[in-house]
Amino acid sequence: MFARLLPPGPRRSGPLLAALLTVTAFCASDVVARSHPFGPRTRSVNDLGNQYLPFHTHLWDLLHGRADGGVLFNWQSGFGASFLPDLATYVSSPFALLVGVFPRDRIDLAVYVITVLKLACAAAAMARLLPALRPGRWWAAGLLGASYALCGWTVSSATYNLMWLDGLIALPLLCLAGEWALAGRRRFLGIHIVAAAWTANFYTAYMATLAAGLVLLLRLWLSGLPGGQRFAAAGRAGLTTVLGMGLAAPLVTVVYFGSAHASPGRFTGFTPVPTQDLLARLLPTTYSFGSPALFVGTTALLLALALPFVRSAPPRVRAGWTLLVAVVTLSMQWGPTQLLWHAFAAPQGSSYRQTFVVCALLVIAAWHTLSYGPPGRRALAAAGALLVLTAAVASRSDLVRPLAWPVLLLAAAGALGGLFLLGRTAGRPPGTRRRNLPAVCAVVLLLGTQVGEATATAAVATRLRLGHMDDYAPWGQRRQQQAEAVAEADGWPRYRTDPGREQTVGNDPLTVGGQGAQYYSSHTSDVLLRSLTALGGGWTSGGRSLQSLDNAVTDAIFSVGARVHSPPDPHQNWFPQDGSAVTVTRQDVPPLVTVRPAAGPSAFGPSPYRNQELLLGTRVYTVPRLTVRTGDGGTPRRAGGDRPGVHLDALPAGTTTDRWPTITARCAAGSEVYLWSPNFAGTARLADAPAGAPTGRFRSDPVSKIAAMQRLGTVPASGLLRVDLSPNRPSTVPDGAVGCLDTARLHTAVERLTATGATEVSVSGGTIRARLPEGSTGTAVVAAPRIAGWRCATGDAPAVPAGQYHGLIAVPLDGTSTRLTCVFRPPGLRLGTAVGGMSLLAVALLGVLAAVRRRRGTGPAVEDGLYKRA
């Protein structure tokens, strides 16, 4: 398809130049920043390390037949999760398939190569679009194509959210499809472009489609066509968009329903940035997470600012493109339109994900300026004055760092100098030395300026990201040891192997293997979040990143028969290293399918210990009365609201252990001690514990994190236990924080569930089959979250939607059937397939009609890119 997009002959030079400039500047920036793969600094910041690299690793496993599950279902994450929404959100881009040709332990390099290729394609696509809007110089198309691909939005946000780069590619291609609709040609290629854009990344494709629609409306207004032909062109564009989206419906619908059943997350209200911050992001080397990165290069910015003053351009062109840039920029600063750009769903994280649309419009405006010839002195003077005014207002922003001024001055000098030299060649006859030499110097100066300031801006963004975002080490010895430990212990589906509580990234099971509770996705199910939280689980990212729960009772409930234990990740430095090695513990657990009494269980309550007992079916914990004291022996004050319990202040650095707050309680000697304190941040350990006793490490904050329950050791022979606490930020300890587990009772409960549970369990993709003992009655419970999409049947009965047993899959038994089958189908897949089928049929019918019209010679004639009467 891309070969058809590139025109033959010299006109390919612009896209090729744009791709070359983009790759050169982007790789040079990583050399300057000493970032992977050109230096020791990791690229895996924030969600790139936590989500996207693990999902690309899982795609590698799928391509090589090594994944637990398939395209529809993922058995490795969250005790079983729908995978098609994740695939459509994170790895449905055609570029993602390139991971399959890299070694599994070099996924970091594969993702970097994919990122570079996407940037090159975005630059080439924009360089292809610009001459289609209006003829111009090929080198200018290459320059502005690179300016678009390396805009501030790209280097600040999209390079570590690499799915968004598909939207960067899609926007110029969708605008190109709009041009074809305007001209009445290449309808089927336009449909395929829309379908590919929405398949690759529906989120940014939605924004790009809105932007392309605005561009088309402006083009229709500027075209001078009669009203009937304008409506016809708009109708062709609308039909192209609808059919293309229809072809992508099988993925789009499952994403929609996956989001509908996902954890709601924790969102903050939209607050527009101050004007000085908005204008600051137009300048090179500025960076922040929460403001729109509008940088497109000083050359493109000067040209866009000069457009209203270019007298050779028609007034409608000057007014139309200038107003469109202004209106779309202002729409980012108003809540209702900001929500519209984000498909009416408030984003969790950066609020300006549509910024690439404004960057594209700035580049298109710059192209229109240059397409009418080099701007004259008056236009350049006006643009320069506006740039100075912009810089003056932006200087009041904290986002402008000292480095920005020398880079801006050099870039402005290079851009103005290059445009001035270019303008001096305008009146000279072509082919002469007096014209060619200044023109070559001007082009070299403009290209060098673009590459230089883009390199500096990208390098600064790469370095500053590491300063304020979590980052993660690439594949190394730690993960290799974890993967080997998981592979050696793996017994799926007889039991699960959890890769461990001490996680490396938020999706450890996808990277090192196993089948654990860990799961970080935009589609983390709400039922899984509520169930694990009620059982004492922890999470981050507002409830979308669930953590492993190292607890003997929950391991029995979810059939975790092997568990990996690792030291804290040294790359994070959240807690001091304890010198331990990667180890594996095993325990006897029931099968994945167990049989419970028919009577419905009681509802979950506030105590995770009692909630675990409800799912287990046996009382195994003692929850003692607690006494909490501050470091000086006083009674801490109580806290209320959504963080109830006793309040503890953060300890000053260097506080000795005898000044730590304590919890005291009494339990049976030899029982296991667990501490549940979701709003505690710091460490906890049993006083006078023997060497090798575990230290509980808790991470929480008031907004986005709660800490998981932790095992602290065993109760001493005296029965009196004391827990020493070292809070590193203000924390609360709830009532009923300590639970003492009777391991003998737990062992008895496991034996009972094993004796009455399934005698045989097999798993294939999204299907689980179990054979139950003869005469089983009550309820069969599958140790997997009851997310939407499960249908189950016993014996030869028809499948019906699965029931729920405290968030787990439940199927009633009648005492006669010994076979249980549960099948998963992602919600929305049937609807999406039907819509996709109808769209495909409509495209086929259009193809037949087009062929008939061509044979009859009644097709439209095309001239100069606009639809004309034959």
Image: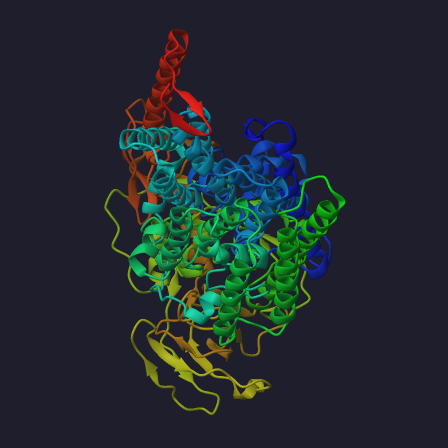
Give 796 or 102, whichever is nearer the viewer: 102
Is residue 100 visible in the rendered image? The answer is yes
User: Seen from this angle, which residue lies furthest top?
Assistant: 855
**Quadrant location of the C terminus?**
top left
Where residue 158 sits: x, y (%)? 53, 52
- Residue 4, image x, y percentages: 55, 26
Where does residue 240 sit, x and y in percent of width and height?
37, 29
Residue at left 28%, top 24%? 797
Q: Residue at x 61, y 63 (%)?
A: 412
Quadrant of the image occupied by residue 815: top left
Q: Quadrant of residue 203?
A: top left
Q: Vertical placement of 723 versus 175: above or below?
A: below
Residue nearest the observer in this picture, 599 or 331: 331
Please indicate, yes or no, whether residue 713 appears anywhere in the rendered image: no
Left or right of residue 370: residue 88 = left
Q: Quadrant of the N terminus?
A: top right
